[in-house]
Amino acid sequence: GGAALCVYRGHAPSTPVWSVSSAPSGYYFASAGSDYTARIWTTDRTSPVRVLSGHVSPGVNNVAWHPNCNYVLTAGDDKTCRMFDVQTGRCVRLLSGSSRGLNLVRVSPSGRYAAASGYDGVVRIWDLGNGRLVNELRAATTAASSSTLRHQQQLSSTGNFSEGMIHAMSFSSCGAALAVASEDRAVRIWDVRGAGNHLSDPTYFAAARGADATSSFGGSNGGLGTTTSQLSRMPANELCRPGMRVPTKVFGTNGVDVMDLKFTKRNLLLAVGNY
């Protein structure tokens, strides 16, 4: 039993294929491999119909579809995510800003944001409308459990320590939450509503305060030129710099690595561990 129904070939010979993702509409699927490329396939053809090139490092680690099925996003070891037009194969967005290679990419259900995680343990969020990096999600290291610290020490001693590498991410079906599982054997739930709505983002600042307003965000009083009472009435997310958000919930495990996460349509979070 278990015979293959079909074999799809097209990536460079003897190179691994790291990721496969089916289009939300079916029929098409995409793959990413260690040959600088991602490729688009159809279920009734064994050769690719599009080759998506542009990454400058061989490792293209992950691929994800945009909800409208017109775009495919990739994450690579060259520290970038790229968004490709499915019809033309052209790269239409270059999402940069990571300090390390990227191993995962996910698109929000609304299609507005892309979230990608790197080997540095940071989740970065981009606005796909303009390609701007709008937020970063950083896990606090002070709350690590004793089992987590022992695990990190073991990784460090074997040379495999990766600064909290993230293994899995999943947006909730409503797009309000992002679940993240990382090297510290914990699952964090982040509230990502209004992820780009903070006053350190020039685009949002201009929209919220007017095109002629000025800001030196980060000075006294937040650098906003407003009074304390005005600041107290402002939405908390507007004052929260990228990287300063905290997770709304943290779930620990009994020393088990969480390798994959998936929200159901009813926002039930499923996790797969390395038991």
Image (cartoon, grey):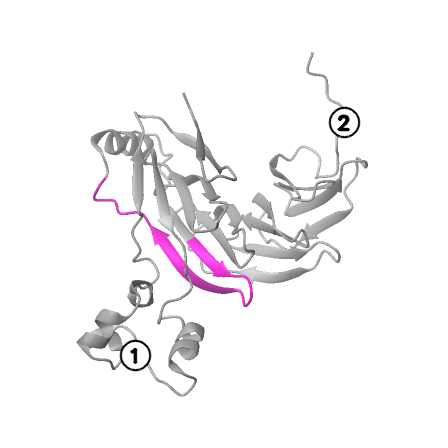
- Left or right: residue 188 compared with residue 91: left
- Left or right: residue 108 compared with residue 204: right
State whether residue 59 appears in this view: no
Query: Tag 1: Cα neighbours inside 10 Å, few (<14), some, or many (≥20)?
Result: few
Query: Tag 2: Cα neighbours inside 10 Å, few (<14), some, or many (≥20)?
Result: few
- The x and y percentages for residue 88 are 75, 58
Depth check: 137 or 235 in front? 235
Residue visible at 33% across and 67% down in the picture: 238
- The x and y percentages for residue 145 are 22, 34
Residue visible at 56% across and 56% down in the picture: 111
Which region is colored magenta?
124-143
State whether residue 190 appears in this view: yes
Depth check: 72 or 100 in front? 72
135 in the magenta segment: yes
Q: Mark 2 points at which residue?
A: 6
User: What quarter of the picture does the C terminus occupy?
Assistant: top left
- Left or right: residue 119 compared with residue 114: left
- The residue at the far bottom in this view is 212
- The x and y percentages for residue 193 are 41, 57
Amino acid bearing label 1 = Ser
Q: Residue 263 carries which label?
A: none
Quarter holding residue 2: top right
> Sequence order check: which comes first, mark 2 or mark 1?
2
Depth check: 75 or 128 in front? 128
Q: Name the residue under label 1.
A: 216
Relative to 10, residue 77 above or below: below
- The x and y percentages for residue 79 are 49, 53
Amino acid bearing label 2 = Cys
Relative to 108, residue 162 above or below: above
Residue visible at 36% across and 36% down in the picture: 183
Quarter holding residue 211: bottom left
